[in-house]
């Protein structure tokens, strides 16, 4: 087994140095504290759910999955509005990467994520910062502030409590699954096109596993849901990768593989023809590692990490050990490992408040290297080989969370496959209808087009929409796919009818026969009125009444014509503009360019 096969891509030293550019301004996050006193009492939970969340625009952790309700202490409750509030902040069409951390309780998951927040606040793509930030201030002699010359992690005096909530001690802190309320935006190089593109990153924190209050079924559900949601999953382990860590990972990952890949379905392949595995990347983060042989050279230390992972996943003679490793590699595109030394004994104290100076320098250097490694060229979340946007990710998350509503019972594989296929069909339907509308808006969005042009545009947009549908809805129950396709067809035809009616209403010549008849009536009435005025004698009351009637008729018809003209003003003005353009083109010599105003004709 090669190191590349195990570790995957590692950012170059140049990329890491670029990520730690001292010219990047400081922007310390100011979120509200995450609620850490989630009660296990069902009555208290019901009361908390009824409370309105305070209006707070500052970034903070939001709970997307809570555990326990009045009827079931282990039930999962999905908070769709919280998830939607996060994904809504991602620009349309942007792909999303989900970075999550799982592991045993009290192993520093939330502490690590709080450092991720600070790293991303300094390195993500953001609008120019205000002049209040230290790195944008210049000294009187024009030189940069001294704080800009520091490493990113040296610019903070304290980690504080304004990120994912953490604390020292032995009691569990995080319950359920939490997501940071603000997505971050990074650049990545697309592996196929080699072009730079933007990607959104969301961070997810999970409840610690293997404590005295969490059942094994609930632990499996938390691990399982996190794995289904993530594109980059960090498995936080203490001191070493133990065999039970591998067995726990293999148990769910193999189960998930069966759930996401039906036995009779054709294997999904990527652009290079390689079989697409159900999950993307698992990264073992070994905490409090004490066995580095060389602690002065980070590159040598990373080489030791690679050697250690290869030894952990080396071929085994025992059948069960061998199968465990085969299952993990069959389920994840990349398996990697990173090791961090102990942060310092003061950090693990209950009284520790986040003082950065109390952390061991080597821990901070490794933290710097790990952050650059995690967020270098992230891959978006993928389902069956398709990279997902925020709009596509939401239905999958909702479908998976609903599966785990009863945390005491792990969902059946067939149910998980059905949920995945259902969310996939939903996305195929939505995206194909959106594709049709986008194509039609280009042609008939705001101006009149000829009926033949509209019909041709409809056929092309319909073809493009269903080509997109077929490229997405390619697995799961065929009957459900057919139903989604038929629903998409009905919605597209409804939109086609709307486009047709709107286009007809924009036709400047629509109802022109009414205008012609009205103008003819007004013309005849004006002529007859003129004749009556000239020929009627003073004693003929009938003639005078006829003249008055013709005058009133003429006035009414003129008012009617003004009303009609006002309703068709834009269409008429567009028609007049086109006529002027045509006349100008003819005057300019058969469609040539008009003569410049500053050039006089000879």
Image (cartoon, rainbow, N blue to C red):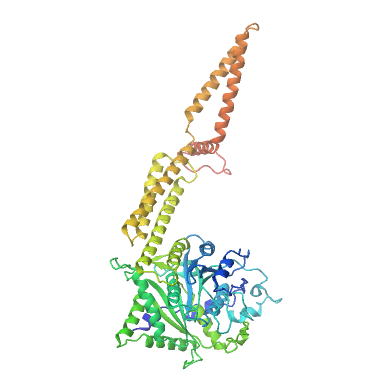
Figure check: 284 above or below 43: below
Question: Closest to the observer: 128 or 321?
Answer: 321
Q: Which residue lies at the image location 59% right of the left edge and 78% below the top edge?
A: 22
Task: Report the residue that reaches farthest toward the bottom.
Answer: 293
Question: Closest to the observer: 588 or 177?
Answer: 177
Q: Is residue 199 visible?
A: no
- Looking at the rendered image, the quarter that the N terminus falls into is bottom left
Q: Is residue 121 visible?
A: yes
Q: Quadrant of residue 569 in the image?
A: top right
Figure check: 239 above or below 118: below
In the image, is 326 to the left or to the right of 153? left
Q: Which residue lies at the image location 44% right of the left edge and 69% below the top edge?
A: 406
* Residue 154 picture location, percent across and down: 61, 82
Question: Closest to the observer: 14 or 290?
Answer: 290
Q: Which residue lies at the image location 40% right of the left edge and 79% below the top edge?
A: 249
* Residue 348 picture location, percent across and down: 57, 86
Figure check: 485 above or below 379: above
* Residue 50 picture location, percent across and down: 58, 63
Task: Report the residue that reaches farthest toward the left.
Answer: 264
- Looking at the rendered image, the quarter that the C terminus falls into is top right
Task: Report the residue that reaches farthest toward the right.
Answer: 140
């Amino acid at each position: 087994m090669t190191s590349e096969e195990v570790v995957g891509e590692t950012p170059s030293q140049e990329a890491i140095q670029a990520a730690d550019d001292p010219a990047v301004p400081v922007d310390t996050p100011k979120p509200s504290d995450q609620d850490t006193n989630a009660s296990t009492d069902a009555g208290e939970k019901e009361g908390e759910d009824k409370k309105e969340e305070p209006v707070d625009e500052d970034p903070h952790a939001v709970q997307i999955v809570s555990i326990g309700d009045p009827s079931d202490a282990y039930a999962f409750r999905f908070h769709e509005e919280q998830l939607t509030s996060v994904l809504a902040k991602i620009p349309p069409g942007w792909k999303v990467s989900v970075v999550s951390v799982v592991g045993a309780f009290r192993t520093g998951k939330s502490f690590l994520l709080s450092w991720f927040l600070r790293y991303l606040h300094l390195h993500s793509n953001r609008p120019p910062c205000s002049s209040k930030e230290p790195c944008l201030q210049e000294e009187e002699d024009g030189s940069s502030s001294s704080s800009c010359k520091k490493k990113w992690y040296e610019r903070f005096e304290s980690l504080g409590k304004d990120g994912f909530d953490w604390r020292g001690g032995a009691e569990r802190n995080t319950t359920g699954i939490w997501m940071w309320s603000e997505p971050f935006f990074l650049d990545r190089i697309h592996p196929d096109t080699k072009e730079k593109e933007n990607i959104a990153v969301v961070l997810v924190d999970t409840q610690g596993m293997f404590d005295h209050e969490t059942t094994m079924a609930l632990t499996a559900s938390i691990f399982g849901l996190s794995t289904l949601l993530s594109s980059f999953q960090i498995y936080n382990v203490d001191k070493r990768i133990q065999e039970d860590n591998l067995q726990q990972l293999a148990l769910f990952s193999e189960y998930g593989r069966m759930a996401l890949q039906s036995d009779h379905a054709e294997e999904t392949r990527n652009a290079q023809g390689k079989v697409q595995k159900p999950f993307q990347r698992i990264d073992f983060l070994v905490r409090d590692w004490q066995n580095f042989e060389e602690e002065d050279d980070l590159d040598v230390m990373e080489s030791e990490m690679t050697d250690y992972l290869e030894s952990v996943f080396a071929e085994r003679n025992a059948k069960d050990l061998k199968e465990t490793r085969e299952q993990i590699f069959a389920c994840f595109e990349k398996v990697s490992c990173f090791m961090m030394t102990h942060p310092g004994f003061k950090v693990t104290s209950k009284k520790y408040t986040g003082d950065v100076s109390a952390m061991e320098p080597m821990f901070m250097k490794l933290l710097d290297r790990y952050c650059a490694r995690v967020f270098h060229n992230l891959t978006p979340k993928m389902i069956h080989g398709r990279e997902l946007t925020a709009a596509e990710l939401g239905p999958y998350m909702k479908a998976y969370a609903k599966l785990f509503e009863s945390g005491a019972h792990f969902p059946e594989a067939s149910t998980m496959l059905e949920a995945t296929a259902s969310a996939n069909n939903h996305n195929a339907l939505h995206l194909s209808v959106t594709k049709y509308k986008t194509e039609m808006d280009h042609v008939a969005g705001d101006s009149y087009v000829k009926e033949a042009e509209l019909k041709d545009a409809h056929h092309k947009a319909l073809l493009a929409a269903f080509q997109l549908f077929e490229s997405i809805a390619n697995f799961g129950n065929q009957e459900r796919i057919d139903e989604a396709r038929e629903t998409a067809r009905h919605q597209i035809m409804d939109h086609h009818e709307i486009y047709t009616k709107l286009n007809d209403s924009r036709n400047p010549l629509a109802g022109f026969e009414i205008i012609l008849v009205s103008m003819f009536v007004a013309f005849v009435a004006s002529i007859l009125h003129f004749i009556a005025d000239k020929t009627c004698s003073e004693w003929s009351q009938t003639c005078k009444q006829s003249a008055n009637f013709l005058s009133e008729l003429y006035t009414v018809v003129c008012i009617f014509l003004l009303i009609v003209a006002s309703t068709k003003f834009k269409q008429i003005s567009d028609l007049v503009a086109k006529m002027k353009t045509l006349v100008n083109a003819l005057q300019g010599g058969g469609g040539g360019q008009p003569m410049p105003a500053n050039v006089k004709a000879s």
